[in-house]
Image (cartoon, rainbow, N blue to C red):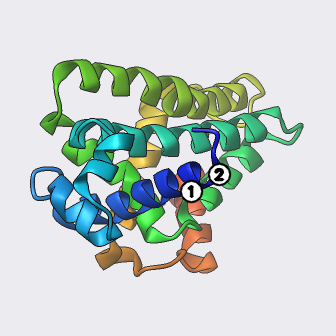
Amino acid sequence: MNNPETRNLRQQILSTANRLFIQEGYHGLSMRQISEALHISKAALYYYFKDKEELYFAILETYLDEMRVVLDRILADSTTATNKICCFIEYILAQPTEKRAIIRLASQEIEQVSPPTRQAFNIIYHQKFIRKIEAILKSGMEQGEFKRINPEIATWTLLGMMYPYFYPAHAGSGALPEGTIREIITIYLEGINRK
């Protein structure tokens, strides 16, 4: 798929299918609906993706590849672990809701696909996303910036705090306001107990 026109159509398919999966859910969406939304034939759609499951997986994998690049850049920065976690939270929550909602799409809909696809997703989700967040938190613990707690629990707690903002009802259609992002960062890093 080195042809620019071919790459462009593939990207359009991923973008449109992403939006439709978020709106309709995995079972609520058909390949016919996707082809109609793109104004292409089903045959053209099947040229790029053999079925709905492969297309769904490609959306998740594309997002995780983007996140891996961002997290690798954050990890390579010589700044503090606190600043790295702030950069990560800001990056995620400043994305448009449709982009942030891919994480929700993965967690809510992954049980709908075959076991091999679920297994493949879990491997790349942990390699490209979860383990990299854990690495930031571990470095902060080693440097004495953070309490020594279980980094896996700390990672899932962070994602749990952010999860409601992956829904348009909570977050609107764009990036979260900067003030809201700062409050989430403060609550995560400092907690709500008065010192």
Lateral position of residue 63 relative to residue 70, left or right: left
Q: Residues within 10 Å of mark 1 (few under 14, many from 20)?
A: few
Place of residue 71 in the rendered image (x, y in percent of width and height, measured from the top left):
67, 39
Name the residue nearer the viewer: 109 or 84. Answer: 109
| Residue 150 visible from this viewpoint | no
Quadrant hosting residue 14:
bottom left
The residue positioned 10% from the left and 51% from the top of the image is 27
Which quadrant would the N terminus be assigned to in this image?
top right
Amino acid type at mark 1: Asn
Pinpoint residue 77: horizontal percent, then vertical percent.
Answer: 85, 39
Q: Secondary structure at mark 2?
A: helix
- Quadrant location of the C terminus in the rendered image: bottom right
The structure residue drawn at horizontal position 63% and vertical position 45%, both measured from the top left corner, is 3
Residue ID for mark 1: 8
Specify the quadrant of the image occupied by residue 134. Answer: top right
Q: Is residue 152 visible?
A: yes
- Return the x and y of residue 186 as percentages of the image width and height: 60, 61
Near-viewer residue (135 or 91):
91
Q: What percent of the width, then of the height, locates residue 74?
A: 75, 41
Distance, label 1 to label 2, CA atoms, is 6 Å
Tell me the crowding category of disc 2: few under 14, some 14 to 19, or many 20 or more residues within 10 angstroms, Cα based.
few
Q: How many marks?
A: 2
Mark 1 touches mark 2? (CB < 8 Å): yes
Classify residue 60 as left or right of residue 114. Answer: right
For this rendering, which residue is in front, 144 or 51? 51
Please tell me which residue is depicted at 65% across the width and 51% down the height of the picture. Answer: 4
Tag 2: amino acid = Pro
On residue 4, which mark appears? Answer: 2
Q: Decide: is 43 above or below 194.
A: above
Up the image or down, 145 lies above or below 149; here it is below
